Image (cartoon, coloured by chain):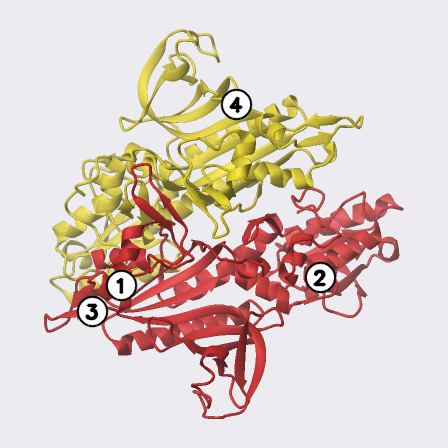
Chain colours: A red, B yellow
């Protein structure tokens, strides 16, 4: 992609109404724009990151055996009355022209449970796991953490249905491993901790995946012996590590990047969702749910992987792999050399953003490069063209090196 | 995919509350389920079709030079007051907990225009075209055409911005060709006609793509000389074909599967969106918009390509390419042979739905196959196993033939 054509421009000044680092860098870099607090537009650069994250999540979910579907955002209020959740404060309310009361989906238990009930009759139909990557709506009182806590956001939500608790636990463990793998592949594995948390109204405990960063709204206690953590909300009732029994913890601020939740029979009871077991008896279906916010994951990566100059994308979720910069103000050969390398990179199938802008200085181009944070920067300039080399620098490396085209392709 | 594992089952009886053929076949086949009138859940089979359609549209849009982004569904009501559209009856209304008035996006001119204004200052920033594949919400008074007219539906909407009318017309023509290509690739090219229609409040005319089918809510008049059509709504003021001057027309019922629209300066005026031309003068930006509903396109394909038994998917948008059916009630060798062919198909990268269900009769499996409508049916049975052949039948072929595995792979 030629940067001169890219929709979305970098912005020098921090947006006045943003305090979160993720939002500041993402808006300044041309990844997102704010419609209003908690609601963002994803520009082409930002959507590329979202699609990378989406692909990782989809692969890992498919590997657990979950099947992808797509549920609607308009939900009948009556389904929430049935589960006792019609009064929760994050629900957006509206209505059809015929007066039917509607809420916007803040999660999908109220839709997926009656749907699964239509197709599950017998133990032979279980276990079942379905997921979607779809937009959620939550009427948050305040939305000030950039794309970490949105009023509208893309979420992967998975729901599983089981004949008994043992089978639920088997699948819950598979999801736990898939989550671990997702966060590792997104580049925040080292900073992310499986955390025991409150189970809310559904069960005693749930599990969160918490990523350490100063921008976090949560506080966790990480066991000094194993990697298990405990959320502050249940720290008092959990004096020892639930994994290894250790009682020394390190306190950290963190962001919840994912959660997995035993729902037990809370929703199957509400919708009278039962199955016939092998003996022909009716049994309630055991459910679990498993969520990851895609924008929140993207924002967390920015909070973790950035410096004073901008973002440092891990390769796996970077909008492009290479940022090719030409500094051709002096000579036409430089432009030619950059065009040649651009086409060589494209021919190798390497995703490249080519800064071919003619009205920007070298300083502006480098500053934009650091802000946007593409992993590899390649420069063609007065310094490189006659020697037939490329100045290459990893975004997080202290300095550049000069290599031949052959060497560059070996590095990439 | 093993059919025994697939979420969603075929249903023998037509759903009582559906009248549209598309909804009847898609619900009975396990592609979609209805949440309430005009709102559908896409099950794994249905989502596979949507993703095929999405991929075709994305490729064709990218080829026009339009850049993909993702805009929100929550829109500030004030933007609609600014364009004079706050009173249109299809708007869903809600509000933030702080009282801010919100509507759900029924289209995105009110969001994309102020967004483009942030980045377009000079003639150098034009032309610009952006698109998204995103969910729209329309509070339809009645929703009774299955997935053809939804209250919530996936739509590809593209918006273009130009310095002058000539440049707009150049791009409008590129979009027209992309639309033609999309409908051809989706298998409804022969039945789809470019149609002159009313321009509504924006301009005198717009262009629709209308697909002939009895389920259509529209009526068009197709020129007996060229392929141009005229929508009934402007037939009185258009006695002769606008393309070739012919005055003989054939009247047909049809579905609008896409439309392209000159917006002129309607929205750029409302948001005071101007650019500086080469001479340094402020000029209003000329806009166009280009829409295709993904569910509507899917439903139209079903209306056009089906018979009394079910759907006949064109290969390009079929959920799977091959439906492998094993009739093994009698012998274990048959099951083995089917498993072997299943893995051979997967190894070749051919998408296959494998009907390995043990509790279904041959008659039920064939009926489900015809209902689901996968292009190629392969049967392994008592009739084939000893001769080491496969019974293969195209969904729309009158009868099956017996071929070797080598011959089958040549056919596919």
Going 41% across and 58% down the picture, which residue do you hit? Answer: A89
Residue A408: x %, y % from top left: 73, 62
Name the residue carrying label 3: A284
Kindly report the distance in space between the C-alpha atoms of the residues bearing marks 2 and 4.
43 Å
Kindly report the distance in space between the C-alpha atoms of the residues bearing marks 2 and 3.
51 Å
- Could you say which is closer to the camera, residue B378 or residue A314? A314
- Say yes or no: labels 3 and 4 on the same chain: no
Is the C-beta separation of discs 4 and 1 under 8 Å? no
- Say yes or no: labels 2 and 3 on the same chain: yes
Q: Is residue A16 left or right of residue A280?
A: right
Kindly report the distance in space between the C-alpha atoms of the residues bearing marks 1 and 2.
53 Å
- Say yes or no: labels 2 and 4 on the same chain: no
Name the residue carrying label 4: B202
Kindly report the distance in space between the C-alpha atoms of the residues bearing marks 4 and 1.
59 Å
Kindly report the distance in space between the C-alpha atoms of the residues bearing marks 3 and 1.
34 Å
* Figure label count: 4
Circle 4 packing at 10 Å, graded few (<14), some (14-19), many (20+), is: some
**The residue marked by circle 2 belongs to what chain?**
A
Q: Residue A117 lies in what quarter of the image?
A: bottom left
Circle 1 packing at 10 Å, graded few (<14), some (14-19), many (20+), is: some
Q: Is residue A30 above or below residue B242?
A: below
- Could you say which is closer to the camera, residue B366 or residue A202? A202
Name the residue carrying label 1: B339
In front: label 3 or label 1: 3
Name the residue carrying label 2: A310
**The residue marked by circle 1 belongs to what chain?**
B
Q: Residue A176 lies in what quarter of the image?
A: bottom left
Q: Residue B275 lies in what quarter of the image?
A: top right
Is the C-beta separation of discs 3 and 1 under 8 Å? no
């Amino acid at each position: 992609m030629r940067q001169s054509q890219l929709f979305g421009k970098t912005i020098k000044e921090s947006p006045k109404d943003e305090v979160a680092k993720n939002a500041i860098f993402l808006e300044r870099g041309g990844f997102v724009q704010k419609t209003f607090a908690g609601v963002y537009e994803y520009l082409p650069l930002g959507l590329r990151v979202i699609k990378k994250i989406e692909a990782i999540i989809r692969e890992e979910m498919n590997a657990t055996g979950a099947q992808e579907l797509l549920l609607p955002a308009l939900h009948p209020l009556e389904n929430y009355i049935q589960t006792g959740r019609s009064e929760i404060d994050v629900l957006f309310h509206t209505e059809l022209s015929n007066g039917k009361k509607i809420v916007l989906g803040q999660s999908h238990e109220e839709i997926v449970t009656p749907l699964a009930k239509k197709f599950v009759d017998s133990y032979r139909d279980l276990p079942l796991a379905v997921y979607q990557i779809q937009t959620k709506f939550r009427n948050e009182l305040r939305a000030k953490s950039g794309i970490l806590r949105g009023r509208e956001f893309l979420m992967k939500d998975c729901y599983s249905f089981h004949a008994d608790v043992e089978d639920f636990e088997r699948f819950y463990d598979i999801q736990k491993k898939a989550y671990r793998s997702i966060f590792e592949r997104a580049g925040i594995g080292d900073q992310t901790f499986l955390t025991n948390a409150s189970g809310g109204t559904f069960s005693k405990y749930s599990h969160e995946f918490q990523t350490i960063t100063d921008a976090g709204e949560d506080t966790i206690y990480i066991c000094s012996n194993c990697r298990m953590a405990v959320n502050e909300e249940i720290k008092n009732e959990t004096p020892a590590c639930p994994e290894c029994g250790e009682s020394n913890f390190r306190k950290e601020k963190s962001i919840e990047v994912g959660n997995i939740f035993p729902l037990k029979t809370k929703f199957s009871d509400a919708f009278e969702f039962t199955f016939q077991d092998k003996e022909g008896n009716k049994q309630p279906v055991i459910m679990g749910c498993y969520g990851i916010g895609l924008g929140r994951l993207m924002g967390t990566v920015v909070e973790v992987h950035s410096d004073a100059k901008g973002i440092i994308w891990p390769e796996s979720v970077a909008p492009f792999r290479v940022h090719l910069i030409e500094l051709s103000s002096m000579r036409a050969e430089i432009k030619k050399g950059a065009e040649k390398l651009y086409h060589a990179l494209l021919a190798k199938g390497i995703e490249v953003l080519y800064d071919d802008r003619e009205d920007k200085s070298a300083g502006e181009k480098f500053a934009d490069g650091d802000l946007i944070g593409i992993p590899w920067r390649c420069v063609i300039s007065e310094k490189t063209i006659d020697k037939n080399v490329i100045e290459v620098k990893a975004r997080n490396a202290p300095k550049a090196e000069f290599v031949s085209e052959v060497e560059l392709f070996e590095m990439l």
